[in-house]
Amino acid sequence: MNGPLLKVSDLKVHFPVKGGVLLRARDKNKAVDGITIHIDNGETLGLVGESGCGKSTLGKAVVRLLKPTAGTVEFDGQDISNLSARALKPIRRNIQMIFQDPAESLNSRHTIGNLIAEGFEIHKIGTATWRRQRVAELLEQVGLPTSAAERYPFEFSGGQRQRIGIARAIALEPKLVVCDEPVSALDVSIQSQILNLLLDLQRDLGLSYLFVAHDLAVVKHISDRIAVMYLGHIMEIAGADEVYAEPKHPYTRALIAAIPEPDPGRRGRAKIVLAGDVPSPIDPPSGCVFHTRCPHAEQKCSLEKPVLRDVFASDGVAPQVACHFDL
Amino acid sequence: MPAVSTQGEPLLRVEGLVTAFATEAGQVRAVDGVSFTVHKGKTLGIVGESGCGKTVTALSILQLLPLPAASILSGRILFEGEDLVTAPIERLHAVRGNRIGMIFQEPMTALNPVHRVGRQIMEAMRLHRELAEGEALRATVEMLDKVGIPSPEIRMLEYPHQLSGGMRQRVMIAMALICNPGLVIADEPTTALDVTIQAQILELLQQLQDDYGTSIIMITHDLGVIAETCDDVVVMYAGRVAEQGSVEAVFGAPRHPYTQGLLQSIPRLSTPRKSRLHTIEGMVPSLTEMPVGCRFNNRCPYADDRCRSSYPDLDGEEGQHRAACHHWQRLEQQL
């Protein structure tokens, strides 16, 4: 196939902010405000940013759990941003999602077997015997005993439930899986088990991932390229190693400097501590959305919005950065 | 690399603490024989995964345990020359919020939503000090300014929901510090915050410790936060201490297989991308089904018959780098 598997162009997702007696829309929450990204076959794009930056909203718009306000989402060359639910159904097989909290995303009244087989039922795939066999295969693939099929979600720990969520997501052999903070609710020793599983599945099934998370070390580990988001905008996209070795955007630099590393020897390093809080996406700052917290901001930054532009790269993956300056 | 933990004047000594909960399955010990010392002006980290007993340890110190389910079965908690376990309730009232301040993970649930934040801080102070309204007001404004809240005269009149997560945590810190306590217990103070805000709060705590000489117990599951902020560390597993010592010693040369496994399983910025991460097989045993012998034996790659029959005590002297493992010396030679 030519061209990327997923192509998102100038995507906007705005939510109405209701108020007043009649609950009319008074304002817009610009959660995602003009984002362009692509994901190739078998590639992982990491999406990082702090709470409220719009990363989960972007993930949901890609799966079409949300309808974009403007812009397009192209999957396998087909524009899916305005398709009806019926027209979307065959495409849904190819785009699946893994959620942060597997306790909330699994229906507690169904057995694990039924939960995993739900997709087969919806898409009318296979006979009952085939489905049972396939569920057993999937359970094995995600590292659970086949006997789990007869049991209920509450009988499993957080890490095991996440494995069930993953089995559900890969059941229909999708091409793209959107992972929304899949390990942030898990303990450290379980987190590494799940990350290894995701990497194994990608290798074995040729999956592409859109990996949404706030933990930069985790994102760097699993991604090929990383997009850094702030207030609905992309600040920087580059190869995963490049982002950490040579962050170009001042926000990326601050994010990386803020990660506490488990190495007491690093304690004396120079830190960049950003002042203030993230502004509200209902009333984002003019010009560059980051200028209110940026240590390098000049007058131009509050007036002119910087476009995402290519910069010189040493490793061949052209990084893009949305900043007026070459810092 | 100093093998000896930070020396200094001890402020708090916890000795052989056992805290149990009454459950349908019988009595379970959430904390089972934990000892450590916090020195004046220093930070002690308690790290471990969910359910390891780190929060119960903290709540035991102030006896804020849920009653009647929980009780301290044995042990001593010596703070400023007084055993808090046997102290009468009036003494505990005098210590809580006054000599020992507390910062919780979720300030939204710890703060009262229907009172202005300034009033809540003043209340904490006037409970312990006889102060006129005006003096309390002045002290509150000063403290809010100190913790980095802009225009404190205005912000103190706001309600918790009007503040951002980072600002609310600053209010919590102001409240914990308003009586100039000797010790502050911070239970996952930055877990609910974004990394850039976490960096602000950790820097603030460090600066306040430098200014006031307060001791801090930092409870977290994040080994990065421990490495960044603590002098000494206690690694807990399933209600017991697996390893303790200075941060440099424990992170530099971990002795307990659990600590080693934890440190190896975190992806770091220096880990090659998409490489296999180290894992600790299995999961933490439930408190009602603890394995006999070392509690880590069902997940430990080095476990043998001895580990499955007898629990290893922490070896070495109090204040030294210590591990509760039968085999750490042998393992250290092999590595």
Image (cartoon, coloured by chain):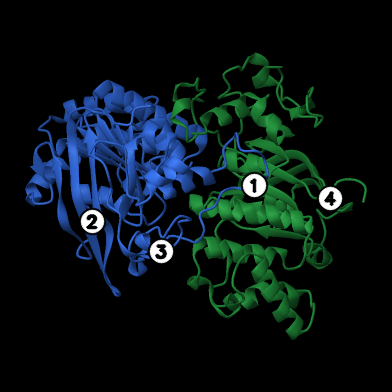
Identity, as a three-letter code, of the amino acid under mark 4: Leu
Disc 3 vs disc 4: Cβ atoms closer than 8 Å?
no
Of A136 and B189, which appears nearest the observer?
A: A136
Depth check: give the residue in front, A18 or B207: B207
In this view, the mark in front (1 or 3): 3
Image disc number at residue B65: 2
Query: What is the number of callouts on the image?
Result: 4
Q: Which residue is depicted at the point 35% across and 59% down?
A: B294
| Image position of A115 (left or right of A269) | right
- Using the rendered image, report if marks 2 and 4 lie on a common chain: no
Same chain for mark 1 and mark 3? The answer is no
Around disc 1, counting alpha carbons within 10 Å, would you say few (fewer than 14), some (14 to 19), or many (20 or more)? many
Q: Which residue is mark 4?
A: A5
Q: Colour of chain B?
A: blue
Q: Chain of mark 1?
A: A
Q: Which residue is mark 1?
A: A212
User: Circle 2: is it few (<14), some (14-19), or many (20+) Cα within 10 Å?
Assistant: some
Percent coordinates x, y for residue A256 in the rendering: 57, 30
Write the residue at 21% across / 27% down: B8
